[in-house]
Image (cartoon, grey):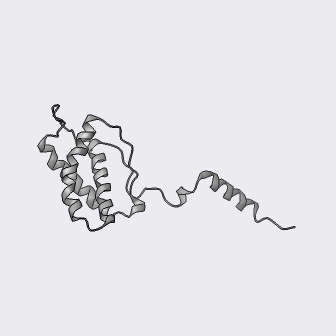
Amino acid sequence: MDLPVVVDSNDDEIVSHELEQMRSILEEAILETRSTPLENRPRLPRIPLSKRIRAVVRAHNPMLVTYLEASRDLCETDSILFGTAVAVCRIIGAKLPMAGRATTQSSAIPAWRKRIEDVSQRQGPLSAD
């Protein structure tokens, strides 16, 4: 999405008209995260630090208070924090894999193990002769 963030050079604060747009992106990301099973969440990219990104993260801190105070358990807190990370990625324009394309069980098997299993299946069981 890459929301243009205006940073005041004196105190790194984000201009107030952008906060409402950020809040709606945050709410949407938290709702999506709550309804997505853990294994289907996208991997979060590594993001280099910059003045702009710090300002976006700092702007989310006061927004999180309401959500975190209402959190009933650790799973819900996890969804809130992960949703916030997704919202920040969307705001700064970082690429996220599509939901549901997280690492599956079959792709979690290392390639070397797959090759060994394929070879052993082709050769058949070892005989005891």
Asked whether 98 or 111 is in front, the reply is: 111
Decide: is 102 above or below 15: below
Q: Residue furthest top?
A: 9
Q: Position of residue 92 (x, y in %)?
A: 28, 42
Identify the image quadrant of the C terminus.
bottom right
Decide: is 51 above or below 128: above
Identify the image quadrant of the N terminus.
top left
Decide: is 69 above or below 88: below
Quarter-wise, where is residue 50 in the image? top left
Asked whether 3 or 56 is in front, the reply is: 56
Q: How many marks?
A: 0
Look at 28% across and 53% down and name the residue there: 84
Look at 66% across and 53% down and name the residue there: 115
Q: Position of residue 48 (x, y in %)?
A: 35, 37
Q: Position of residue 81 (x, y in %)?
A: 30, 55
Q: Residue furthest right?
A: 129
Look at 38% across and 64% down and name the residue there: 37
Quarter-wise, where is residue 4 in the image? top left
Q: Residue furthest left?
A: 17
Look at 39% across and 54% down and name the residue there: 42
Decide: is 93 above or below 34: above
Side of 25 where 15 appears, left or right: left
